[in-house]
Image (cartoon, rainbow, N blue to C red):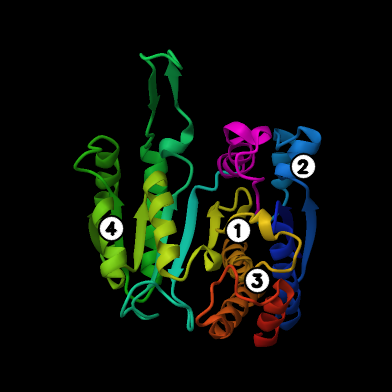
């Protein structure tokens, strides 16, 4: 049965890098006998400005019919008053993650050959870990409010939510992932010395679930210590599990030490397969270079490889997994072209990078 992909190109460079990733998918599919079909959807900041429509429950019901979602990038011009209040971030990104129960944000942190890291004396053998970020709870639930806004007595609060159900399923996924990796090591990152309620739920669940995984070595780091280790000793990490807010921060730090946001891939997973997972490059929409064939699509292409591997595992599609492995290897075989260059302004055209990776297939 054909793999059904919903494609949301989005804003800025999103459509360009998505089309580059789809070109690579076409080539990988031919090499592995993978069959697939794609459907384009218009959801974006531009679409909202033109129509007033963001993403509603009917759209979610339609997207649930697909096996996975390919996302380019969403977001309009900075400080555009028509997009005030995070209408796009909340209305598209968070709605998709929450309504499709994409409770795992998977962020590989791997330094590829030829890519520069800002860390002196560190290389690909030192920077090779994966972050498992809980993706549907914590401060991003939107619980809170403001009283007496605009007065000297203004009060604001935002609630950090940690349910045992949500925490445990994330931790269990992380243990399974750690078990599948050669080092079999999992680190919980939190701030239990200060956040002693939410942190206690996370730490107890981590210890209790860990009793079922005697073959996985475990560790705990406060989030501030984790940031220091990622910069000074990134080799200590193999698999990290982390709540949503702290995960948002450390995964971007991880991208920075592995070459920058321009190469970072990500997956928002529903590991149970009850709804589609969504895959996207971490970089923004870069409206200043949109439509000029200047964007580097390597993160979008690497995210396509991640989509194929993860969706293939969830759906039991061996051809998809094989195609994803091919794409991942082709990306790593091509990164030497970027040695000494800025990934977001590499000097290569968008379609040129796609052609490089297709050749490497």
Gap between marks 4 and 1 measured at Cα = 26 Å
Q: Could you say where residue 57 lies in the image, as x and y percent from the top left?
A: 70, 34
Tell which of 340 and 92 is nearer to you: 340
Q: Which mark is residue 279?
A: 1
State which mark lies toward you, 3 or 1: 1
Q: Which mark is residue 47?
A: 2
The crowding category of the residue bearing disc 1, from other C-alpha atoms within 10 Å (few below 14, some 14 to 19, many at least 20), is many
- As drawn, 67 above or below 123: above
Gap between marks 4 and 2 measured at Cα = 39 Å
Q: What secondary structure is found at the residue carrying circle 3? A: helix
- Name, please, the residue furthest toward the left: 193
Tell which of 108 and 338 is nearer to you: 338
Q: Would residue 216 be visible to someone looking at this image?
A: no
Q: Which residue is mark 4?
A: 226
Gap between marks 4 and 3 measured at Cα = 34 Å
> Who comes first in sequence, dot 4 or dot 3?
4
> Who comes first in sequence, dot 4 or dot 2?
2
**Magenta residues?**
73-99
Tell whether position 79 is magenta.
yes
Gap between marks 3 and 1 measured at Cα = 15 Å
Tell which of 224 and 128 is nearer to you: 224
> Who comes first in sequence, dot 4 or dot 1?
4
State which mark lies toward you, 2 or 3: 2
Q: Which residue is mark 3?
A: 320
Q: What secondary structure is found at the residue carrying circle 2? A: helix
> Who comes first in sequence, dot 3 or dot 1?
1
Residue 108 as seen in the image, left or right of residue 164: right
Q: What secondary structure is found at the residue carrying circle 4? A: helix
Tell whether position 97 is magenta.
yes
State which mark lies toward you, 4 or 3: 4
The crowding category of the residue bearing disc 4, from other C-alpha atoms within 10 Å (few below 14, some 14 to 19, many at least 20), is many
Residue at the (54%, 48%) spot, across then down = 102
């Amino acid at each position: 049965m054909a793999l059904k992909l919903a494609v949301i190109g989005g804003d800025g460079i999103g459509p360009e890098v998505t089309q580059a990733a789809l070109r690579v998918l076409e080539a990988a599919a031919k090499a592995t006998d993978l069959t697939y079909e794609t459907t384009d959807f218009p959801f974006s900041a531009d679409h909202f400005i033109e129509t007033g429509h963001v993403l509603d429950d009917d759209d979610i019901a339609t997207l649930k019919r697909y096996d996975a979602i390919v996302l380019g990038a969403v977001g309009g011009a900075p400080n555009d008053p028509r997009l005030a209040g995070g209408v796009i971030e909340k209305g598209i990104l968070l709605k998709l993650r929450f309504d499709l129960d994409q409770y795992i944000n998977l962020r590989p942190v791997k330094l590829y050959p030829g890519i520069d890291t800002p860390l002196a004396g560190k290389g690909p053998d030192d920077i090779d870990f994966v972050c498992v970020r809980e993706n549907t709870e914590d401060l991003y639930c939107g619980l809170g409010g403001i009283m007496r806004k605009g007065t000297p007595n203004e009060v604001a609060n935002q609630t950090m939510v940690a349910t045992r159900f949500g925490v445990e399923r994330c931790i269990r996924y992380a243990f399974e992932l750690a078990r599948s990796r050669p080092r079999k090591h999992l680190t919980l990152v939190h701030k239990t010395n200060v956040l002693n309620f939410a942190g206690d739920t996370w730490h107890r669940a981590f210890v209790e679930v860990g009793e079922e995984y005697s073959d996985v070595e475990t560790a705990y780091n406060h989030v501030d210590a984790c940031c220091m280790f990622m910069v000074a000793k990134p080799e200590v990490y193999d698999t990290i599990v982390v709540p949503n807010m702290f995960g948002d921060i450390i995964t971007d730090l991880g991208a920075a030490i592995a070459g920058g946001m321009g190469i970072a891939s990500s997956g928002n997973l529903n590991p149970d397969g009850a709804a589609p997972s969504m895959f996207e490059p971490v970089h923004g929409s870069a409206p200043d270079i949109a439509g000029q064939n200047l964007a580097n699509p390597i993160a979008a292409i690497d995210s396509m490889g991640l989509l194929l591997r993860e969706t293939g595992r969830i759906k039991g599609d061996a051809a998809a997994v094989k195609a994803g492995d091919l794409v991942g290897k082709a990306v790593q075989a091509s990164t030497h072209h970027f040695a000494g260059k800025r990934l977001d302004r590499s000097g290569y055209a968008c379609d040129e990078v796609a052609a490089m990776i297709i050749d490497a297939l």
